[in-house]
Amino acid sequence: MASQYDAIGANYDVVKRVFFNRIEQHNLRKRIIPLLNKPDVSVLDFASGTGFYSKHFLEWGAASVVGVELSPAMVDVARQRLDATPNAAKATFHVANGFEPKKYVPEGSAGFDVAAGVWFLNYAKDEEELTRAFENIAMNLKDDGVLVAICPHGVEDTESFASIVNCRWDLATGVKFNYLYPLPDEIGYRMEITITPPATEPEASVVKFQNYHLRKSIYERAARAGGMKGKLEWRMAEFLESEWTRMLKINRDDPLWKSFTQWPDLTVLVIHKS
């Protein structure tokens, strides 16, 4: 997985400049900011990439952030990004595999208050790997800690969902999820994401990478087996319909928009450790 992102490097940030990021960021902000608006909140940011959200977590109220990212090229970009801000001293980054349990808790701390995983868990290819990810999350959180994760839409019937999503090529969000083929034992799908730069960036390159969409029940079993025993909620993506349909130049009654809002590409998974 690191190799595909080492090759992409800073170019990955194009995903943060396309329309899709408005939807992603709106839903993440809504779920995570209430957790950050408390004294001395620490965040462990899995799959921190180029530090885009690590930077935002500090701006949104976190006291400190530790990022974990497999790609050294992306960690280099993240460090440069935070070094250019007033919050540089509050951020630390590690080159590490988030699917291999490891303690990142600072000395003298009981654990992190919040774990964030923006498009992290979808790199697990099966239940065993997903369970290890949850083990890593649980071992680093305080007993009352919370995970907030952006994931593929939580569904059990991934085959029907794949058919719906693969018919949405004409929706100009800048990000296309293409479901390639089902995984063994009907546990989910392999998918490819294509990011098309905004028209205002003619020099930017199209970015492609692959990951997985596992069934909802597999996420839930893996979370419990990994030590996340508390309240588990799949938060349906919300849409600022009138504003966003105007920006996309699409009618709210258009079948493409209806499909996208009824079966969105993303959801927010919130799980309490205990």
Image: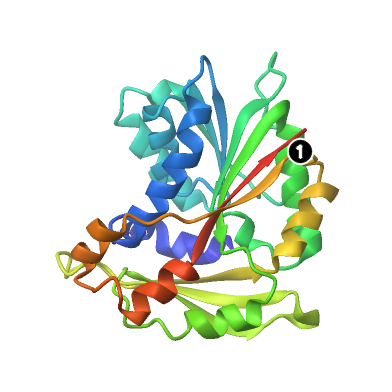
Q: Residue at x 72, y 50 (%)?
A: 133
Quadrant including the C terminus: top right
Q: Of the residues shown, which amino acid type is indicated by label 1?
A: Gly
Q: In the image, is residue 57 above or below residue 130?
A: above
Q: Position of residue 199 (x, y in %)?
A: 17, 70
Q: Position of residue 247 (x, y in %)?
A: 20, 63
Q: In the image, is residue 84 above or below residue 267?
A: above
Q: Residue at x 44, y 86 (%)?
A: 167
For the image shown, how many numbered marks are present on the structure?
1
Q: Position of residue 37 (x, y in %)?
A: 46, 23
The quarter holding residue 244 reads bottom left
Helix, strand or loop at mark 1 = loop
Q: Residue at x 81, y 56 (%)?
A: 221
Q: Which residue is mark 1?
A: 230
Q: Nearer the viewer, residue 227 or 120?
A: 227
The quarter holding residue 161 reads bottom right
Q: Residue at x 26, y 68 (%)?
A: 197
Q: Is residue 228 left or right of residue 118?
A: right
The quarter holding residue 136 reads top right
